[in-house]
Amino acid sequence: MKKLIYATLIVIVFSACKDTASENAMLEQQREIDSMKVVMKEQEEALAKQRTIDSMNAVVAAAEAKAARASANKAAPVTAEQKKKGWSNTAKGAVIGAGAGAITGAAVSKKKGEGAIIGGLAGAAVGAGTGAIIDDSKKKKEKQ
């Protein structure tokens, strides 16, 4: 009976004794893992904030560049070449003269085709000359 009681006591003592060293090691590992997770989360949040700041800076820089281009365009003097759009008076005169000359040449001549060609060429020359004179006078007025 004594042996049975001793055996029971030994079993109780061994079962009551826990391996605290391995338990402490496991707890320490879990704490390290948790602290690493916290650090990683903080780093991810910092990166997200930095990305937001970078995108905001890019938007601001683009807006500033657009404003700079707009102010540069307003500040630049407009030259006569930039104002000039469409046909020159020389080109208009040549086309109008060619049309009028061709109609007149065809109406006056017995050979309608030849008269239209000759009248068109003569009318274009006269119209171009007249248009060139008008262009020249406009340029002189702009300089004054």
Image (spheres, helix red, strand yellow):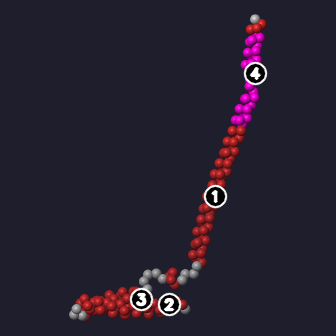
Q: Provide the residue designation for mark 2.
A: 139
Which residue is rendered at x = 61% and y = 61% of the image? 58
> How far apart in space, not on screen, are marks 4 and 3 (Cα)?
113 Å
> How far apart in space, not on screen, are marks 1 and 4 (Cα)?
58 Å
Residue 98 point in image, percent of width and height: 33, 89
Mark toward the start of the polypeptide (1 vs 4) = 4
Q: Which mark is residue 90?
A: 3
> How far apart in space, not on screen, are marks 2 and 3 (Cα)?
13 Å
> Which-is-in-front pick, marks 1 and 4?
4
> How far apart in space, not on screen, are marks 2 and 1 (Cα)?
52 Å
Mark toward the start of the polypeptide (4 vs 3) = 4
Q: Amino acid at mark 3?
A: Thr
Q: Provide the residue designation for mark 4.
A: 17
Mark toward the start of the polypeptide (4 vs 2) = 4
Q: Amino acid at mark 2?
A: Lys
Numbered range of the magenta stretch? 5-31
> How far apart in space, not on screen, are marks 4 and 2 (Cα)?
110 Å
> How far apart in space, not on screen, are marks 3 and 1 (Cα)?
56 Å
Mark toward the start of the polypeptide (3 vs 1) = 1
Q: Is residue 83 magenta?
A: no
Task: Classify mark 2: helix, strand or loop.
Answer: helix
